[in-house]
Amino acid sequence: MSPTVFATGFSMGLTLIVAIGAQNAFVLKQGLRREHVFAVFLTCALSDAILITLGVTSLGVVTAVLPWLEPAMRYGGAAFLIWYGARSLISAFTGKAALTADGAAVPSLKATLITCLALTWLNPHVWLDTVVLLGSISTQFPGERMAFALGATAASFAFFFALAYGARFLAPLFARPAAWRVLEGVIALVMWGIAAKLVIGM
């Protein structure tokens, strides 16, 4: 395995994943609340690994066989993001949450993972970054495409681990309800911004 190709995959994967998006905002929120952090981190990282592998090995085959998949995901993902953004906006105006030991009841692991999976697998931007973009870039490395995929996958694991477990260092800031309301408002705007791009086809 070529270290250079691995490093290229790592840098390209990291470049695409660091932009704030629905998935990252959710991981950050779970890390701040310290709720099911490892499960959320692992779910996002493994999902990315599957999608990256799909892009490197099967780019073009999936969309050719299932031409309806792209528009279905685009509009379905937009609908989910609009709903999730509305929920965050309501929380921004009415919520009184803070990082305290006696806060609101923790959502179940099942409910958390369902939301995490939806934000990942119903989000066409995730598919665009992992399957389409990274899959396309990997064609530049014939014979070393799996090294590229491993590098991109390693970047995903490193980033989600840092985001999920590094969020706790912001805990003193989010001990104030006002900080949580601002975060919920930002999350709502991010969700709706991505939904708008999906609907208008950007």
Image (cartoon, rainbow, N blue to C red):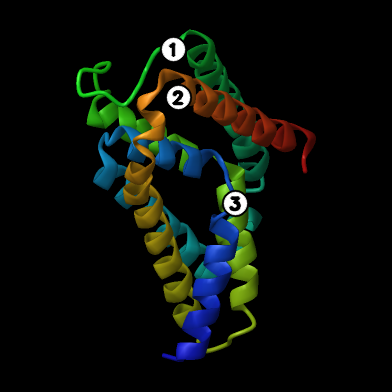
- In the picture, the disc for residue 19 is 3
Dot 1 falls on a residue whose secondary structure is loop
- Residue 121 visible in rendering: no
Dot 2 falls on a residue whose secondary structure is helix
- Amino acid identity at mark 2: Trp
- Amino acid identity at mark 3: Ala
- Amino acid identity at mark 1: Gly
Q: Is residue 69 left or right of residue 176?
A: right
Given this view, does label 3 or label 2 mark the residue nearer the observer?
Answer: 2
- In the picture, the disc for residue 67 is none
The residue singled out by tag 1 in the image is 95
Residue occupying image coordinates x 64% and y 83%: 140
The residue singled out by tag 2 in the image is 180
Residue occupying image coordinates x 38% and y 56%: 162
Residue occupying image coordinates x 51% and y 29%: 183
- The one of 191 and 144 positioned closer to us in this rendering: 191
Residue occupying image coordinates x 56% and y 49%: 126
Quarter of the image where the C terminus is located: top right
Mark 3 to mark 2 CA distance (whole Å): 21 Å
Quarter of the image where the N terminus is located: bottom left
